[in-house]
Image (tube, helix red, strand yellow):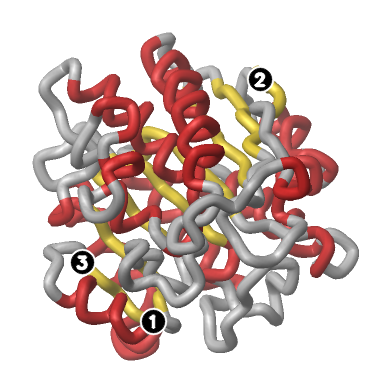
Amino acid sequence: MRPLSVIGVPLDLGGGRRGVDMGPSAVRVADLNGRLAALGYSVEDIGNIPVTIPETQHVGDTHSKFLKEIVQVCNHLAQLVENCVAQGRFPLILGGDHSIAIGTLAGVSKHFRGQHQNVGLIWFDAHSDFNTPETSPTGNIHGMPLASVVGIGPVELTRLYGIIPKVQPQNAVLVGVRDVDFREKELLASSPVRVITMRDIDEKGMRSAMEEAIKSASQQTAGFVVSCDMDFIDPAYAPGVGTPVKGGASYREAHLAMEMIADSNRMLALELVEVNPVLDHMNATANLGVELVLSALGKKIL
């Protein structure tokens, strides 16, 4: 097995509800490192990237709140992720809010761009995260990262770490979406990003949905990054998220998705975001997050 590096990013500047800055700690408390080691991985925990808190900063432009601070964190993360991949280590990133994905994708893409290869993306989320400062009803950047990584949005994000786009839109797949803002819907519909909604999963099943997602993210790429927002899962199983939406993936559907990713042997990096222990019950969401990480990294029933 490849050696694995855990990187915590306790960022909650991108969202409107506090608490996801404690997500990396909650996931570690759920014995992430010990359970990865038991699975056979050599685990190096790099610790947490330093992140400022909202109380010490000015919000800045209300259409893209805390943009400067988020860019700083994402640049730091991109460098760490690029170094991990260059050293042959698998990056496992713990959020924090979903804006950190811009840094993760920048780092992975920078490494493979140097080898004249593109990377794909499978993005699990209840929301499409495809807003821009012009379309966002809140100005929260955690609603913009998917658009940013495919080259749509403010230049500070789209060109972060010198890579644009970080993922070709036709190699990006959004899975489990069920809550899309009005103007965001138009932007997403005009993009080549593949969208697999919860209705699609209801109709054809998770297996078919994941076969399609893996195929699209793998097409002429070195592999794909998996970015998993825990609100992809129904709040009955994952209550500790900042923006829960009813009707998400079930416990077994989520595990099947991760097991199929492991079977593909195409995953280049994995991030788990939006765990909010303030809103959780007995750390259930972090515990489920660890279980899903283990499934994505090869844990099998038999």
Q: Is residue 271 left or right of residue 34?
A: left
Mark 3 residue type:
Arg
Q: Please tell me which residue lies in front, 144 or 266.
A: 144
Mark 1 residue type:
Asp
99 to 156, vertically: above or below: below
Residue 295 in sight from this viewpoint: no
221 to 143, vertically: above or below: above
Q: Circle 1 is placed at which residue position?
A: 181
Q: Is residue 230 left or right of residue 189?
A: right
Place of residue 172 in the rendered image (x, y in percent of width and height, measured from the top left): 24, 55
> Is mark 3 in CB contact (under 8 Å) with mark 2?
no
What is the C-alpha distance between the residues marked 1 and 3?
17 Å
Of labels 3 and 2, earlier in sequence is 2
- Asked which secondary structure carries label 1, the reply is loop
Place of residue 291 in the rendered image (x, y in percent of width and height, measured from the top left): 66, 52
Task: Please identify, in this view, whether the residue under mark 2 or under mark 1 is nearer the observer.
Answer: 1
Residue at position x 55%, y 38% from top? 69
Residue at position x 30%, y 50% from top? 154
Residue at position x 19%, y 16% from top? 114
Label disc, if present, on residue 293 of the rendered structure:
none
Q: Circle 3 is placed at which residue position?
A: 194
Mark 2 residue type:
Ile
Residue 29 in sight from this viewpoint: yes
Place of residue 33 in the rendered image (x, y in percent of width and height, measured from the top left): 73, 31
- Asked which secondary structure carries label 3, the reply is strand
Q: Please tell me which residue lies in front, 186 or 32.
A: 186
What is the C-alpha distance between the residues marked 2 and 1?
36 Å
Q: Quadrant of residue 131?
A: bottom left
Q: Quadrant of residue 222?
A: top left
- Asked which secondary structure carries label 2, the reply is strand
Of labels 1 and 3, earlier in sequence is 1
State how many labels appear: 3
